[in-house]
Amino acid sequence: AQTVTQSQPEMSVQEAETVTLSCTYDTSESDYYLFWYKQPPSRQMILVIRQEAYKQQNATENRFSVNFQKAAKSFSLKISDSQLGDAAMYFCAYTSGTYKYIFGTGTRLKVLA
Amino acid sequence: GAVVSQHPSWVICKSGTSVKIECRSLDFQATTMFWYRQFPKQSLMLMATSNEGSKATYEQGVEKDKFLINHASLTLSTLTVTSAHPEDSSFYICSAPRLAGIGNEQFFGPGTRLTVL
């Protein structure tokens, strides 16, 4: 069975600094997709970034980028120039073969002014 | 981006009553929708997959007779919590993919907070 693990329950970062959130997963599939979702206090889930496993190039979206290491089954999220609005729960998610998502346990990010 | 709404945003009910939660895709059609449950400070746990025109598929351990799902149209799925008890109190979230194809982004509703007294 596929699993997604986020080993950092909570992280803090100073405003304007860079922070990296970790995610590892386990799967026997060769074709799959990975996501980072943000859940602010409003509880609305927002897509941050998406990575196709068959693409070697790491996805980037403005200040957000990933380090996708397929062999190591690692998918970390780097947030550059952190802003107060980045404070939220961040969930790593996996899907393969169906639309079903498997979520990690989440990392709470605090941004310090 | 696509919009998914949920109604109500919060509901309080007495133990033993039934509660219906609606999930609507406002600007796209969704043949498949998903229902999640999220306990405080925890992750989203998939409860069931709602399929338009057919029976829902429930995850292991989810009581299908307690959590009734009806996907009546391409834009509406409902989750009915029957004979609710305090342990059913939780945050319920639905999602739907706007585009067909595995790996496409899913859009999430804002969630419904259920409190059972």
Image (cartoon, helix red, strand yellow):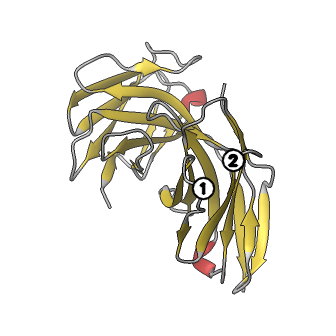
In the image, residue A77 above or below residue B58: below
The secondary structure type at the circle numbered 1 is loop
Within 10 angstroms of label 2, few (less than 14), some, or many (20 or more) residues? some
Q: Nearer the viewer, residue A75 or B49?
A: A75
**Chain of the residue where label 2 is placed in the rendered structure:** A
Q: Which mark is residue A56?
A: 1
Estimate the x, y position of residue A68 in percent, counting from the top left.
67, 56
Evaluate if marks 1 and 2 touch, with contact meaning CB atoms under 8 Å apart.
yes
Taking the view exactly as shown, the residue that stands out farthest to the top is: B65
The secondary structure type at the circle numbered 2 is loop
Label 1 amino acid?
Answer: Gln
- Tell me the residue at 58%/29% (across/down): B86
Estimate the x, y position of residue B93 in percent, counting from the top left.
46, 43
Estimate the x, y position of residue B55 in percent, counting from the top left.
32, 16
Label 2 amino acid?
Answer: Lys
- Tell me the residue at 53%/32% (across/down): B46
